[in-house]
Amino acid sequence: MAKGDDDNFTGGGNGEEEEKQQSITKMKHMVQSSIYSTHKNFVSDLVFVPGSINVDKRNPGDGKLTHFISCSEDGVVQFWDSRFVEKEFLKKNPDYVWKPYLRMEVNRTDGTGELGLSRLLL
């Protein structure tokens, strides 16, 4: 094998890795949710609800991506509103505890226990 051929095998993935590293954005958190009102197991999926779907009639999203849904293996689906995590709101309400506004438990139809979820599809 020629030296140039060897470079294709060892160096081919480096360009892809560099591209992935450049697309990663580091962000600082703004607020944390309370451990008592959220999932008891790791979050397996998180999906933003399209702006065209009205999730909360009392507080509509006005066509923007403001709501998301999280699911976990603990058998719970939670609906979140991200508008309350804006900087201006948090400055005015420093003691605000972010929590889901809707929580659904997913149980088996025969009532023998909960179902753990791994993926959400809208």
Image: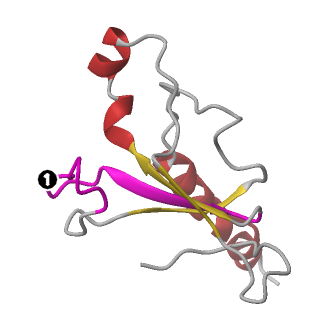
x then y, percent, for residue 102: 48, 53
Decide: is 122 above or below 20.
below
Q: Residue 67 colored magenta?
A: yes
**Which quarter of the figure has residue 32?**
top right
Figure quadrant of the N terminus: bottom right
Figure quadrant of the C terminus: bottom left
x then y, percent, for residue 119: 61, 75
x then y, percent, for residue 12: 65, 70
Amino acid beneath label 1:
Asp
Tell which of 50 and 100 is nearer to you.
100
Number of numbered discs overlaid on the protein picture: 1
Left or right: residue 37 versus residue 50 is: right
Left or right: residue 103 versus residue 84 is: right
Q: Residue at x 66, y 72 (%)?
A: 106
Q: Residue at x 72, y 66 (%)?
A: 75
Q: Residue at x 49, y 47 (%)?
A: 22
Q: Residue at x 71, y 69 (%)?
A: 7
**Which quarter of the figure has residue 76?**
bottom right
Which residue lies under the disc numbered 1? 62
The colour style of the image is secondary structure
Decide: is 6 above or below 46.
below
Q: Secondary structure at mark 1?
A: loop
Q: Residue 78 colored magenta?
A: no
Q: Which residues are magenta?
A: 55-73
Left or right: residue 15 versus residue 76 is: left
Q: Residues within 10 Å of mark 1 (few under 14, many from 20)?
A: few
x then y, percent, for residue 73: 76, 65
Left or right: residue 106 versus residue 92 is: right
Main secondary structure along the magenta-highlighted residues: loop
**Which quarter of the figure has residue 63?**
bottom left
